[in-house]
């Protein structure tokens, strides 16, 4: 009794001190506590992997073995057989106390390596000394042989041979964008309406494919004609889809077998034996057949993510878990009552942990750009049903509660707010934010549904199914609406637009003529000349990235191939075409705009101090910028302090933002994806503001080469929003969140003291009402004070589960670089 | 010659006598787990440091 009372007292003190990570540890079940601490963290810290994390060589070895054995097969079939070889022979494992199984690597501490993707990344793998598995000498020998075999043969190697040489060189410079234009490394949506609505398992799809094969075989044995010619390739693709689905079913059965072996031969605890036999039963059921209960539904969902990550380095996880698994939660908890709520929380928490543990080797630039995590697993919650009614359910609430217990930085949640969301759900969202998770981010569902319909023509019922394709952009989960390949390389370092407008297109950092020659800026006579130069650089930058990505997209079936993703996509099963082919897809592209607000603040600064006040000449400004502001500190501070800045409800600079966005929107309608659809822009940053800090030169907003760029999207520069949160919202409301771009990321930092208790909830609710009334599409919150963050910098071991919102994702504070930590601390804490 | 099927870690596949799983217990710095790898029944085991005769 005394111990229980002491524990309660300790808990209350942690709550009072807002040490939510300790509250979580002391409140969650023993199982969740074990599983949470069992994870080998795969996110890189300051660009380097943690000690003990090793590359998994099994997949490249087994994939290459299968690839070599089938060298006469076309791409998709060859790929399917190589993947089947991996799934049949790789090592699998079941963690103690786990109820869900499946992992991409062979062992818990390993990172997946996709050797067929890009030789430049394969070389990085070889040279990542700390990640080479023991025995090192032997591993390096094997890796060298693998790299030698694949050199020149990877997807990116082959794409490089067809890209225009100038585009290739500029793209590979690393200063204008990032990512590689191959589905080997990208963000794939899913046709969840086909695969996760309980209507079919993999055996049902195999039967559908068999029927199509039978039909095709009859036609190709009949009268010849042009209409039967495409069927020959399709039959091979269908065969590939069958092979991979069967391999996946058999792979799940391997787990069923292992669970049974452990139960019958090793496990003495009767309760654990029972759990293992349930795991066995689960893996015999899914993915072969549709799920029957919550555990099977989660296992199917997890298997889909595991299998898709055997096929490609998928850097996002577009999904809507409360919507698709909700009916099974209802069945297991409310109807059959086979699970009590606490047991369901264990499953939900573990479902999140299984995602948190995903490990994919990423090149250094990606690790610096997305620090502390291995991919942006943004899970979409809430929203509406296809008929427009509220889609929130008991599982929505249960996810929010479980998130506060397990405190993983990834997955994070993004909540689709709409006017009919119940107060109890909003309170759960607020509690997650108040507990310092940095999520859910809040999305304005009515705005984003209209946005999806406006930019890409999705019908309203399809638009309503939307999930986050990556961090921010909506994507339907339907047959023609979902996007199977979104390459991160449609990501622009947009600060280069203003930099090149002021340098006649010359990049001082890489010493190359990158953008078009838009005129000697020293000779610009008025703001309009500068602005038109900026427009030209903007168009050039969007064009070069989109050209590259469009070509990568249409070549991808030939150069890479996605048999598994095709096999779980209705249009692909129907057509026999690789799902990455744009045929049959409506189109859902966007260009991510990193480092966006620098353009606006810089243009405003030049307009004010050079052309309006005539305090400096263009010649003086360009001289100072070419010197990277060195020796011009007084002038630099003038540009920092005395030029208007975005986010202060000041029309002088806000009008420039609107004008810039509208020029981009105009051009977005002019450039088309392979499906003939638009390419709207989406300002957000991940941690590109840190990665690009040494690649963007001095700018007229007062920034020096090497300074961190602003933290994201349409967020004001750190400390530059001086007029309070409502002013920020008002600035952000001056453009149209439907027509002026795809979506717009806004970071806000709130005071944990101000937002304590019921009063805090009411303040936040009022703020959210203003946000919604002003028509903004996104906002996300950090709610942790400077004192805690500084303490975590000093004693990171005591703050392992302290989470911060970085940009379109959250990370554990101790897992991000010092520079990024300081950048977050610099963000203004707004009082509501 | 010592073969895998003589080891306590070897579990034959019921409908394929030529194959089985090698199941081992691992305790690493973070977690404990059981792992399994497919092996041929008559695979050479004399150099395996995990071999335990039945």
Image: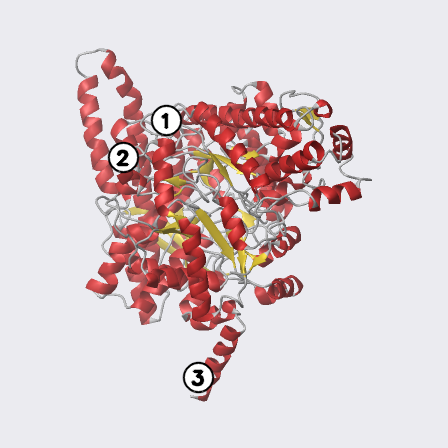
Q: Residue at x 27, y 42 (%)?
A: A193
Asked if both marks, 3 and 1, belong to the same chain, the answer given is yes
Chain letter of disc 2?
Answer: A
Q: Position of residue A53 (x, y in %)?
A: 56, 52
Is residue A82 rendered to the left or right of residue A194? right
Corner quadrant of residue A137: top right
Q: Position of residue A423 (x, y in %)?
A: 34, 62
Mark 3, residue position: A4
Q: Residue at x 42, y 26 (%)?
A: A673
Chain letter of disc 1?
Answer: A
Give residue A582's mark: 1
Q: Position of residue A179 (x, y in %)?
A: 53, 35
Between the C-alphas of marks 1 and 2, the distance is 14 Å
Give residue A104's mark: none
Residue farthest toward the right in the current orientation of the protein: A631
Between the C-alphas of marks 3 and 2, the distance is 55 Å
Dot 2 lies on which element?
Answer: helix
In the image, A619 versus A8, the foreground residue is A619
Dot 1 lies on which element?
Answer: loop
Q: Earlier in the sequence, mark 3 or mark 2?
A: 3
* A314 lies above or below A532: below
Q: Residue at x 42, y 60 (%)?
A: A765
Dot 3 lies on which element?
Answer: helix
CB-based contact (under 8 Å), mark 3 and mark 1? no
Is residue A66 rendered to the left or right of residue A495? left
Instruction: Let me know if residue A518 appears in the view.
Output: yes
Between the C-alphas of marks 3 and 1, the distance is 61 Å
Asked if both marks, 3 and 2, belong to the same chain, the answer given is yes
Mark 2, residue position: A570
């Amino acid at each position: 009794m005394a111990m229980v009372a002491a524990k309660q007292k300790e808990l209350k003190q942690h709550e009072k001190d807002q040490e939510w990570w300790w509250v979580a540890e002391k409140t969650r079940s023993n199982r969740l506590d074990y599983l949470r601490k069992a994870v080998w963290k795969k996110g890189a810290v300051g660009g380097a992997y943690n000690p003990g994390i090793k590359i998994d060589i099994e997949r490249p070895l087994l994939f290459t073995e299968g690839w070599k054995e089938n060298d006469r097969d076309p791409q998709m079939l060859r790929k399917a057989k190589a993947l089947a070889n991996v799934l049949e022979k790789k090592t699998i494992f079941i963690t103690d106390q786990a109820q869900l199984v499946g992992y991409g690597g062979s062992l818990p501490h390993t990172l997946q390596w996709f050797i067929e993707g890009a030789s430049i990344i394969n070389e990085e793998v070889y040279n990542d000394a700390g990640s080479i598995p023991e025995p090192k000498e032997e591993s390096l020998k094997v890796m060298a042989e693998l790299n030698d075999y694949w050199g020149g043969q990877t997807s990116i190697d082959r794409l490089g041979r067809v890209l225009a040489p100038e585009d290739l060189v500029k793209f590979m410079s690393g200063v204008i964008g990032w990512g590689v234009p191959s589905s080997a490394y990208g963000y794939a949506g899913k046709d969840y309406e086909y695969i996760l609505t309980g209507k079919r398992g993999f055996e049902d799809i195999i039967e559908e494919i068999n029927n199509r094969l039978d039909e095709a075989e009859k036609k190709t044995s009949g009268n010849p004609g042009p209409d039967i010619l495409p069927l020959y390739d399709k039959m091979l693709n269908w065969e590939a889809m069958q092979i991979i689905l069967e391999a996946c079913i058999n792979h799940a059965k391997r787990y069923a077998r292992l669970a049974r072996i452990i139960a019958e031969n090793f496990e003495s605890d009767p309760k654990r034996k029972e759990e293992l036999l349930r795991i066995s039963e689960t893996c015999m059921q899914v993915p072969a057949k549709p799920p029957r209960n919550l555990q099977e539904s989660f296992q199917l969902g997890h298997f889909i993510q595991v299998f898709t990550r055997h096929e490609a380095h998928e850097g996002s996880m577009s999904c809507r878990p409360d919507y698709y698994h909700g009916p099974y939660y209802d069945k297991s908890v409310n109807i059959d009552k086979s699970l009590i709520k606490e047991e369901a929380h264990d499953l939900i928490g573990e479902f999140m942990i299984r995602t948190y543990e995903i490990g994919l080797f990423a090149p250094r630039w990606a690790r610096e750009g997305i620090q502390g995590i291995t991919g942006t697993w943004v899970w979409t919650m809430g929203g509406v049903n296809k008929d427009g009614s509220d889609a929130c359910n008991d599982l929505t609430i249960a996810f929010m509660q479980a998130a506060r217990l397990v405190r993983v930085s990834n997955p994070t949640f993004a909540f689709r707010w709409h006017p009919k969301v119940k107060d109890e759900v909003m309170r759960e969202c607020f509690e997650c934010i108040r507990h310092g998770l940095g999520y859910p981010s809040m999305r304005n569902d009515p705005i984003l549904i209209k946005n999806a319909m406006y930019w890409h023509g999705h019908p309203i019922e399809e638009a309503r199914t939307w999930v986050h394709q990556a961090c921010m952009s909506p994507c339907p989960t339907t047959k023609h609406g979902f996007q199977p390949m979104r390459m991160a390389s449609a990501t622009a370092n947009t600060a280069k637009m203003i930099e090149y407008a002021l340098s006649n297109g010359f990049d001082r950092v890489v010493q190359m003529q990158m953008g078009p020659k838009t005129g000697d800026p020293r000779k610009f006579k008025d703001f309009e000349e500068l602005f038109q130069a900026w427009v030209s650089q903007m168009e050039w930058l969007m064009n070069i990235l989109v050209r590259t990505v469009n070509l990568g997209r249409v070549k991808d079936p030939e150069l890479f191939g996605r048999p598994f993703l095709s096999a779980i996509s209705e249009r692909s099963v129907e057509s026999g075409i690789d799902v990455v082919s744009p045929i049959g897809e409506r189109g859902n592209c966007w260009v991510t705009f990193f480092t966006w607000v620098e353009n606006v603040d810089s243009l405003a600064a030049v307009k004010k101090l050079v052309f309006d006040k005539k305090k400096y000449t263009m010649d003086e400004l360009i001289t100072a910028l070419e010197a990277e502001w060195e020796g011009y500190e007084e002038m630099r501070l003038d540009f920092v302090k005395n030029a208007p800045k975005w986010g202060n409800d000041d029309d002088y600079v806000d009008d420039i933002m609107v004008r810039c966005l509208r020029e981009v929107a105009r051009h977005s309608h002019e450039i088309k994806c392979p499906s003939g659809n638009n390419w709207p822009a989406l300002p957000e940053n991940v941690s590109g503001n840190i990665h690009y800090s040494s690649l963007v030169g001095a700018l007229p907003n007062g920034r020096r080469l090497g300074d961190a760029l602003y933290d994201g999207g349409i967020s004001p520069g750190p400390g530059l929003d001086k007029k309070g949160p409502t002013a920020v919202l008002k600035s952000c409301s001056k453009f149209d969140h439907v027509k002026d771009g795809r979506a717009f990321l806004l970071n806000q930092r709130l005071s944990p003291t101000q937002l304590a208790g019921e009063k805090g909830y009411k303040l936040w609710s009022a703020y959210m009402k203003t946000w919604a009334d002003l028509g903004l599409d996104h906002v996300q919150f950090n709610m942790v004070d400077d004192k805690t963050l500084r303490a975590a910098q000093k004693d990171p071991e005591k703050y392992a589960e302290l989470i911060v919102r970085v940009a379109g994702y959250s990370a554990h504070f101790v897992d991000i670089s010092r520079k990024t930590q300081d950048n977050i601390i610099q963000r203004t804490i707004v009082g509501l | 010659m010592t073969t895998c099927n003589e080891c306590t870690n070897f579990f034959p596949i019921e409908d394929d006598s030529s194959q089985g799983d090698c199941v081992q217990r691992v305790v690493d710095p973070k977690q404990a787990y059981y792992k399994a790898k497919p092996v041929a029944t008559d695979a050479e085991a004399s150099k395996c440091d995990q071999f335990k005769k039945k």
